[in-house]
Amino acid sequence: MTAAARRRALAQAVRQRGSVPVAELAAELGCSEMTVRRDLNALERDGIIRRVHGSAVAASLRASEKPYPVRAFESGEEKARIGRAVAALISDGETVVLDAGTTAAEVGRALRGRPVTVMPLGIRTLVDLAYDEQVHLIAPGGDVRPGELVVTGDLAEVAFDRLRFDTFVLGACGVDARSGVTTHVPADARVKRAAVASSARTILAADQTKLGAVTFGHVCPLSAVERMVTGAPPASTVDLQALGLAVDHVLRPQGPQLVLNSSFLLEPGSGLAPAARVRRGGPRTVARARPALGSASGPVVQEPVGVLQWCGAGNRVAGGGRVSV
């Protein structure tokens, strides 16, 4: 188990049970108490838990906005699916503004190795993409808000007066049919509005916990958003779609899956099973794949990253591609 997975399990155990002794956590995870203490120290620095007399207890959080490290542990799988799906909507060569926040950070990770121009509003994503040779990175100006590490203020808005972007990937603290898109900090809302105004389209990336929530700072009405990508079930977005908002649902895959080596789009007429012809902006390539639950045979690429749901001939998959057999 990796350190990140272990810490995620520790945080979940503490949240569910309130207070857990270190020895008990070590026994459950199959590691030493020293390892658990190191992980708990890291979680305490991030404000996720508190250490109390040989035990770990959940940290009390503000009612307004949870700290970034706490949100990073929540709905991680859903946010990763959203990130891959949004990245698949972005073409090579595009200029992109990436909002700060944990879901937008997953979009940044999914854009690694792509020939795109990216201006992240979050310092974490800026650092994450800093050494990628394919990504043309633009550093935003402005004040950096501690903890969240998001750029804000007048200087952050200057870039949007001088530049125009193809796509703004917008994160949200709340998405509501009546109140539109909202965020906790009004100063952040100003920067987001400037990004919306300077971009040809806005894609809203929101996990299901944001739907129906309304927070302090209003960003924009839903009419300013071209489409939303979410992991929420379709029944949760009926009111939003009734207002004309296009919604892509990236649900947890059920049944057989195709495991590919990246977030590719499957081409129509590709003669799948067991080989999949895929497109990723450049020359056509063939990636070997097989249903993960085994209804066909075939070699699997090494180090798979993306998982696309097997939907049958001609059906849509996450990211907008179609499969044919």
Image (cartoon, rainbow, N blue to C red):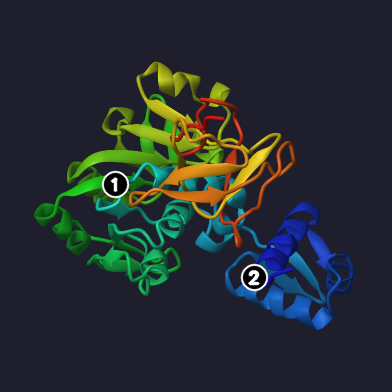
Asked which secondary structure carries label 1, the reply is strand
Report how many numbered discs are placed on residues in the image.
2
Which mark is on residue 119? none
Q: Which mark is residue 43?
A: 2
Name the residue tied to disc 1: 168
Q: Is residue 88 left or right of residue 190?
A: right
Relative to 140, 321 lies left or right? right
Q: Amino acid at mark 1?
A: Phe
Judge the density around disc 2: few (<14), some (14-19), many (≥20) Cα neighbours within 10 Å: many
- At 48% from the left and 35% from the top, the residue drawn is 270
Q: Nearer the viewer, residue 166 or 120?
A: 166
Alpha carbon distance from label 1 to label 2? 32 Å
* Residue 61, image x, y percentages: 59, 57
* Residue 11 appearing in the image: yes
Towards the viewer: 266 or 167: 266
Q: Is residue 141 above or below residue 259?
A: below
Q: Residue at x 28, y 27 (%)?
A: 223
Q: In the rendering, at what x and y percent does residue 43 appear?
A: 64, 70
Give the quadrant of residue 28.
bottom right
Vertical arrangement, residue 28 with respect to residue 100, above or below:
below
Query: Can residue 172 be seen in this snapshot?
Result: no
* Residue at left offset 33%, top offset 71%: 133
The three-letter code of the residue at mark 2 reads: Leu
Q: Image point 25% across, 50% down: which residue?
A: 94
**Closest to the observer, 70 or 299:** 299
Describe the element under mark 2 as helix, strand or loop: helix
Query: Considering the image in quadrants, where does the N terminus appear?
Result: bottom right
Q: Is residue 32 above or below residue 204?
A: below
Name the image quarter holding the C terminus: top right
Q: Is residue 243 above or below residue 231?
A: above
Q: Locate residue 217, reporting x and y percent.
A: 35, 44
